[in-house]
Amino acid sequence: MTTMRRISGRLATWVALLGVAVGSSPTPSAAQSEVPEVRAELVPGGPGDRQAALRLAIPEGWYVYAPDTGDLGLPMAARWETEDRTEPAMKGWPESEARETGAGPVRIYTGPVVIPLVTPPSDGARLVVSWGLCRDDLCVPQVREFPAPGA
């Protein structure tokens, strides 16, 4: 039953996100035009160090689903991409907050978040991070890409 709940919860999230992203008219709704951006910054290690962290500034009143979001939501994901492979980028995820919603419990981040990253697989790698930026009545997928530190 838990698997079916997870699948239906994720399906409902994607359907809702698809409706927000595609919309039924060529002009965005008032709610869509008010969606802020998460400020995201790749913070490199010291000189010559290829290690890094990702710093996110989540706007007040909004939240981002954590990777361990539970049965619902659009989980955050981070990966290093090269021409020939994709590898996980997270070294560990910061503690997330538990939040109860009408559809069930979820795990989220609010405010500033710093995510430690593993060393990129090569100088030509790029970091691709995705999340759903949400408030109680709206959830919008966002993606950011960064070159590897020292690239």
Image (cartoon, grey):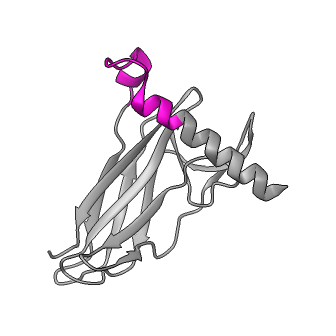
Q: Position of residue 134 (x, y in %)?
A: 51, 37
Residue placed most toward the observer, 1 or 44? 1
- Tell me which residue sits at (62%, 45%) in the image: 11
Residue furthest to the right in view is 1
88 shown above or below 78: below
Q: Quadrant of the N terminus?
A: bottom right
69 shown above or below 118: above
Q: Is residue 18 magenta?
A: yes
- Tell me which residue sits at (19%, 81%) in the image: 123
Q: Position of residue 50 (x, y in %)?
A: 25, 81
Q: Which residues are magenta?
A: 17-35
89 shown above or below 146: below
- Tell me which residue sits at (35%, 68%) in the image: 53
Q: Quadrant of residue 150?
A: bottom left
> 139 left or right of 106?
left
Q: Position of residue 74 (x, y in %)?
A: 55, 49
